[in-house]
Structure formats: C-alpha cells, structure tokens
C-alpha cells in the first residue's frame, strides 16, 4: 500500500462543520454533566442544544475529563451510561467496548469527524488514544446509520482533539513505574488559531495474565506511547477553514510477544454560509493504521481510509431545517503473515447520500432522516430513523424514536485464511442489520437533571464463526433490551453524578447471554470541595455477574478516590488512588486488572 504524507496531513474533514462551528461545552459542579446551553453535534450532524436533542447523549468536556482524573480513555468511558468494557490488563492493553449490549464493532468511533474503526478488525482500540489529546467527547446511544452509515448500530462515540489555541502541560508519576508527560502550545488571535501538542507515556507494567491464560509467562507487561497533534483554524472571507492531525505510536507487551501500533487520522474542512439561510461544510479526511504483532504467530495489518463529505444545512420557515449531504469513502486493507508474505490485499469504496428534516410545532419536535449507501462490494443499503419529542411541565420532556442500522463485514471476516483451516473468512457474507425502538423521559433544571431510556433492538445476519471449522457465516440473531437511568444533581457544594443500567443481551435463537456484558451495572461520582483551593472526589463502579468464553465472571464493586489542589492561579496538583479497597475482579477471563494503584499529576493550565 502506498503511503501519502500529504494525504495524511489533510485529514480532519468529515467533522468540519462540527469542529469549526461548535462552541465550547461547559461542565457543572458534578463533573462533566451537560448544562442546558451545551451544544452537541454528533446525534444530528449539526449544532443542536442538548435540551432539544431527541437522542440519549452524554457529553464530557475538557474540564470534566480533568476532574475525573481517569488513568486512560477506556476507564473514563467505562463509567458512562450504557457502556460495558473488557480489557486484558492495565494501560495500553487490548480493550473492547460494548454500547447498549451490541458487539464491539457495533459502535462507530469518530475522531474530529473522521471514521477510525479499523478496516481490518472493525473496531477502534481506544486504549492507544491519550486523554491529553482530547478536548471533548460526545456519546450518542442508539442507531445513527441514517446519518453516519455503517457501524453505528449501538451508537456513535465522537472524540474531538484539543482546541488549537490552548496552552498547558502535565507530568504524571504512578504505580507500576508509570511515567508520563504531555504539553500543548497554541496561539490565537483575530485571524484564527494554531496549536501543537504531544506527549509520551511509559509504564513497566505488571503481569496482566493469570496461569489459565494461553502462553502464560509471569513477566511484567509494559506499555509505551508517543503521540502528536496539530490543529489550526482561520477564515477566508465568510468561510471557516480548519485542519487537524493526530498521530499515536504505541508498543504493548503481552506474554511471549509485542504489538506495535501506529495510527494517524486527520483532515481539512471548509465551511460557512452560502446564502442567508444556507450553510455548508466540505470535509476531506483520512485515517491510517499499521498494526504489527511480533510473536510466533506474528502478523501485520495495514489499512487506509479516505473520505469526503459535503454537508448542507438549510433553514426553512417556521423553525424547520433541512439537512442533506453526500459522503464518499475508499478503503484499502493489506494483511501479511509472520514471514511477511501477503495474505490479502483488498480495496472497496462506498457512496452515501442522506437527508434529514427537523422541526417543532409548539411543544412538539420531530426528526426524520434517511440514507442510501451504495457499496462496491455489497450493493445498496437503505436506512432510516425517526424521532418525536414533547416538552411539558417545568423542564420535562418525553421522546420516542425508531431507527435502523447496519454493519459491513470487515476484511478479516471476509478474507482471512484462518489458522490451519479453522476460523477462516467468508467473501460471501452479508452485512449485519438492526432495528431499534426507544422511549425516553427526561428532566432538566438549574440544579441537575435526569434521563430515563428504555430500548429494544434486534440484530439479524449477525456474523459468527460456526460449523465444524468455525468459519465466518451469517447465522446469529441478537436480542438487546435495556433500561438506563442517568442523572446529576448539585446539593449545596456537593456534586453528584450517577447512572444505572439493566440490560438483556442474548442470542435470540439459543437464549445464551452475549459475552462480557453485565445485566446490571452502576456508577456513582461524588465531588466535594473542602475550600476554595482543595477538592475531593469519590468514584464507585459496580457490575453484576456476566458470561465469558470459559465460564462466568464474578460481579464486583470498585472505589476510586480523587483529590485536586490549586497551587496558585495556573498550577494544579492531582492524585488518584484507584481500586481503593484493593479488590480482585476480572474484566476478561485469563487477565487481571491492576491492583490498588496511585497516579499523581502536576498540571500547568494558564488562564484557567
């Protein structure tokens, strides 16, 4: 596969309208809860106040990320409503995310609007993206295929990189010989802003595997990461121009082997008004992944995805809006074995055309969207979604929605030769398809808010490895039902944020539970300032018993303690004691999460 440095440097695009026009989000005292003036863009692909949104959405801005003091991104996401995670160790270890009970490749992940799900494996490894590079996260639960296309069956997670005009730096030291440093430098003025940021992460780690793990080796499994980001914004007449680039290089040790991962994503956008009520955004994006495993079963996967989006937003009369656009994606995938011989070298492309009509009459709102995708490999797929909302009382809102989703098989599922004739791909696979319905009730006030969601999803043509040789085939059906309650409240100086979820994620044919998804899960955060310069926080996470490959994983409860002290106007000292009670628990069979550990951070944050 050819590598184009110029193309990699042009890559933020798909999110151009989002990144250029969306205002900075705010967090309340409870640490990251959305406020009434928060603007979200992922659910509708256009800036929308969260108070008027018709999808279950969680927003985490930069202040919420810093206040949470999570050791990494996957740990931060694990505490959000509707999300289960599985990981094979500590920082940097292979991690998977399940949104609303769906498979790990049923969640679309975007970085600055650029699709980063792996062309080869179908999911994005969130463990390699440092929190230092993230400005904001938007989590939309429920299908979004009518706007975003493939993979958005369970929902969409969009990550926005740091504001280019910001400055700051931080140094961290922690257990398992963890050492980290990162810095962000930027300038801003009337003509725009530009920034560059980067950092390093190193940890000697601990023995993440248990004696039951395949190839067990009682050594320490370390992690190293290098990351760099560039960003800039300016104007050309009435048009806003933005460019972003994010690169991460990670080395992750595992028993008897090493994985080297290099990811690059970014793009360029041009957006602004074309007429009095007509705005547009043109976005060019690119994402690359080079994944090399060094072991006796070594392999190398190289993938490249280029995309172009042209989005139009037309304001009609009576508060109605019309959104329409076209999307073009081209994907290349190359796989090599341990001897560096080519296993497969494939490419495909997809063109999507979509539109949405939104409006309100009195206290009622509606949102209708449809999309048609034409794939060079799978032909045409049409998806639709509809949502309705009703505001009543003092801050109450009722919403109902229905939506379709689909996922195109990844190249490993299609073309992998397997191992000795087992677990081979199947080029005749069909895309997975889903239908979902949701009913929600929410309340927003000045002191807090709550949101209750009940959903029902059915996934058909689910891809499984079955039969005498465990080959890939479309045979499974999944039944995903659940209820989520997400809330926040400010009680005096005490900030409270929590969520609880009940779900049934199972094979619709056999009734067997889907692996590593907890039927019950809860998270609670308490934030209490001691005075003007010292704050404390306590996080609690609980998950019920759930099934894994070789049997059930026990339920667990974990507590984490946080503290933050202001050292003058521009400096802060933070400390986090994770797994306070040193509980033993398991997120994936054969692997052990960290024992009680400490992480201390010194941060420079000018202008805060």
Image: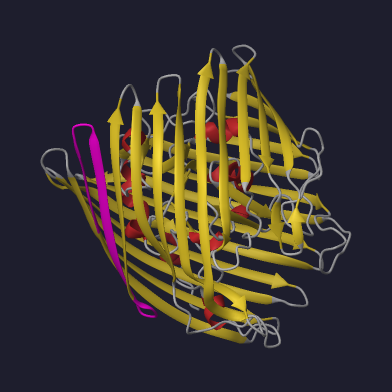
6, 553: nearer the viewer = 553
- Residue 449, relative to residue 598: is it above or below? above
- Residue 335, relative to residue 534: is it above or below? below
Corner quadrant of residue 370: bottom left
Q: Report whether 579 appears left or right of 170.
A: right
Q: Residue at x 54, y 79 (%)?
A: 473
Q: Residue at x 25, y 44 (%)?
A: 366
Can residue 13 be seen in the rendering of this structure? no
Magenta highlight on residue 499: no
Corner quadrant of residue 516: bottom right
Q: Position of residue 439 (x, y in %)?
A: 39, 43
- Residue 12, relative to residue 18: is it above or below? below
The dominant secondary structure in magenta is strand
- How many numbered discs? 0
Can residue 472 be seen in the rendering of this structure? yes
Q: Residue at x 55, y 77 (%)?
A: 413
Q: Which residues are magenta?
A: 355-379
Q: Position of residue 131 (x, y in %)?
A: 58, 44
Q: Report whether 564 appears left or right of 173.
A: left
314, 459: nearer the viewer = 459
Q: Report whether 417 appears left or right of 352.
A: right
Magenta highlight on residue 372: yes
């Amino acid at each position: 596969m050819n590598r184009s440095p110029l193309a990699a440097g042009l890559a933020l695009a798909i999110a151009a309208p989002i990144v250029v026009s969306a205002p900075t989000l705010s967090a309340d005292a409870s640490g990251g809860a959305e406020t009434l003036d928060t603007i979200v863009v992922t659910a509708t692909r256009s800036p929308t106040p969260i108070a008027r949104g018709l999808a279950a959405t969680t927003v985490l801005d930069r202040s919420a990320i810093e206040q949470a003091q999570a050791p990494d991104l996957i740990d931060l996401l694990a505490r959000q409503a509707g999300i289960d995670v599985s990981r094979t160790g500590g920082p940097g270890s292979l991690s998977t995310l399940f949104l609303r009970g769906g498979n790990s490749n049923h969640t679309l992940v975007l970085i600055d609007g650029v699709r980063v799900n792996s062309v080869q494996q179908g999911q994005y490894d969130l463990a390699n993206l440092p929190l230092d590079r993230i400005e904001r996260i938007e989590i939309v639960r429920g299908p979004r295929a009518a706007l975003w296309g493939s993979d958005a069956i369970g929902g969409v997670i969009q990550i926005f990189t740091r504001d280019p005009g910001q400055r700051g730096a931080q140094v961290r030291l922690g257990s398992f010989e963890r050492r980290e440093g990162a810095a962000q430098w930027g300038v801003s003025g009337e003509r725009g802003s530009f920034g560059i940021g980067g950092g390093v992460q190193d940890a000697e780690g601990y023995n993440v595997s248990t004696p039951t793990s395949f190839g067990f080796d009682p050594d320490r499994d370390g992690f190293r990461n290098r990351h760099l980001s560039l960003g800039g914004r300016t104007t050309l007449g009435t048009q806003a121009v933005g460019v972003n680039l994010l690169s991460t290089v990670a080395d992750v040790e595992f028993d008897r082997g090493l994985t080297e991962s290099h990811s690059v994503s970014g793009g360029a956008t041009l957006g602004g008004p074309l007429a009095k009520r007509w705005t547009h955004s043109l976005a060019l994006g690119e994402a690359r992944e080079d994944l090399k495993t060094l072991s006796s079963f070594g392999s190398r996967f190289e993938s490249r995805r280029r995309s172009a989006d042209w989005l139009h937003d037309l304001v009609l009369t009576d508060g109605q809006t019309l959104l329409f656009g076209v999307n073009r994606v081209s994907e290349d995938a190359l796989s090599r074995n341990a001897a560096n011989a080519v296993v497969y070298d494939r490419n495909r492309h997809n063109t999507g055309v979509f539109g949405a009509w939104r409006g309100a009459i009195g206290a009622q709102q509606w949102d209708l969207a449809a999309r048609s995708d034409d794939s060079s490999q799978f032909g045409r797929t049409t998806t639709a979604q509809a949502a309705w909302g009703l505001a009543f009382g003092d801050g109450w809102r009722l919403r109902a929605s229905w939506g379709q989703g689909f996922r195109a098989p990844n190249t490993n599922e299609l073309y992998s030769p397997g191992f000795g004739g087992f677990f081979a791909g199947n080029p005749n696979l069909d895309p997975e398809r889903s239908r979902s319905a949701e009913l929600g009730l929410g309340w927003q006030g000045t002191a807090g808010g709550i949101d209750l969601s009940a959903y029902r999803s059915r996934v058909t043509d689910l891809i499984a490895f079955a039969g005498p040789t465990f080959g890939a085939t479309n045979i499974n059906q999944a039944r995903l039902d659940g209820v989520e309650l997400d809330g926040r409240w400010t009680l005096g100086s005490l900030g409270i944020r929590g969520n609880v979820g009940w779900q049934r994620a199972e094979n619709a044919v056999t009734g067997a539970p889907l692996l590593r998804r907890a039927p019950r899960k809860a998270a609670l955060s308490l934030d209490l300032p001691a005075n003007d310069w010292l704050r404390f926080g306590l996080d609690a996470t609980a998950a019920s018993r759930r099934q894994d490959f070789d049997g059930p994983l026990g339920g667990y409860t974990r507590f984490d303690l946080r503290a933050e002290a202001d050292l003058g106007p521009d400096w802060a000292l933070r400390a986090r004691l994770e797994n306070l009670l040193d509980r033993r628990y398991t997120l994936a069979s054969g692997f052990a999460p960290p024992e009680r550990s400490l992480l201390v951070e010194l941060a420079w944050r000018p202008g805060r």
